[in-house]
Image: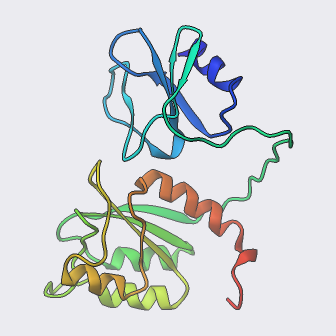
């Protein structure tokens, strides 16, 4: 892993990457996009796997074989921008969960939440007596950000397939496609740490 990572670091790939075993054996590695990787096993060598995408490169001995497009290193020096909003949350939805958990985050000064929902982005919406729709409408109208991801490993959320998903979409919650929940959480903290791009707030 260390040798492969060193080869990836001196390559032309200008990306945040995870470099690690591509198989249970010790024969080659993948350089993988950091925003598209999940740890899928507690102990296997190839525990890190790319989800809904492809590795940037295969690294075998001293050879780096390109597998998918990537940003190429330029001559400009990198700049560290570490502003980050710590008051963001990642919430895993479970059946029967009370939507008042969202009010807790608002009360505690959080700025946004990523809801890891079921399937295509499901939380109780239309027919449920415990509907999340009124709470979501209220907190989003106050400027609280709500992003929707899926608990599934593969696939993406979709706000148009079912009527309850369309109702959820109308609250102003943002469906985040095939973005991994952990990636969405980190990106939300970074974006909300740069609020100068938000006008008339």
Q: Which residue: 65% across, 43% down?
A: 71
When asked about the image quadrant of residue 111, the answer is bottom right
Instruction: Write the residue at 46% across / 86% down.
Output: 139
In this rendering, would 155 be left or right of 58?
Answer: left
Looking at the picture, tell me which residue is in the foreground, 96 or 178. 178
- In the image: residue 18, left or right of residue 123: right
Q: Quadrant of residue 128?
A: bottom left
Point out the image quarter for the C terminus.
Answer: bottom right
Query: Is residue 132 visible in this depiction of the protein?
Result: no
Measuring from the top left, give residue 181's x and y in whole percent.
Answer: 41, 55
Vertical comparison of 198 with 70: above or below: below
Most extreme residue toward the right is 76
The correct choice, above or below, for 58 with respect to 193 in the image is above
Q: Residue 144: x and y, percent?
A: 52, 80
| For residue 5, side relative to residue 90 (left or right) | right
Residue 166: x and y in percent read 28, 84
Residue 47 visible in this rendered orientation of the protein: yes
Question: Is residue 33 toward the left or the right of residue 201 in the image?
Answer: left
Return the x and y of residue 41 as percentages of the image width and height. Answer: 31, 29
Q: Quadrant of residue 165?
A: bottom left
Q: Residue at x 46, y 34 (%)?
A: 55
The way the protein has been coloured in the rendering is rainbow
């Amino acid at each position: 892993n260390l040798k492969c990572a060193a080869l990836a670091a001196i390559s032309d790939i200008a990306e945040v990457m995870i470099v690690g075993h591509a198989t249970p054996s010790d024969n080659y590695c993948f350089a993988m996009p950091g925003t598209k990787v999940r740890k899928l096993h507690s102990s296997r060598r190839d525990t890190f796997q790319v989800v809904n995408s492809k590795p940037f490169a295969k690294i075998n001995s001293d050879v780096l074989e390109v597998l998918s497009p990537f940003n190429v290193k330029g001559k400009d020096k990198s700049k560290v921008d570490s502003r980050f909003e710590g008051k963001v949350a990642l919430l895993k939805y479970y059946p029967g969960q009370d939507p008042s958990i969202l009010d807790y985050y608002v009360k505690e000064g959080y700025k946004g939440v990523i809801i890891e929902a079921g399937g295509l982005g499901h939380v109780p919406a239309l027919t449920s007596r415990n509907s999340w729709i009124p709470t979501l409408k209220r907190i989003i109208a106050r400027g609280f950000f709500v992003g929707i991801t899926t608990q599934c490993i593969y696939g993406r959320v979709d706000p148009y397939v079912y009527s309850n998903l369309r109702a959820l979409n109308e609250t102003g919650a943002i469906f985040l496609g095939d973005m991994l929940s952990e990636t969405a959480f980190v990106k939300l903290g970074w974006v909300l740490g740069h609020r100068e791009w938000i006008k008339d707030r």
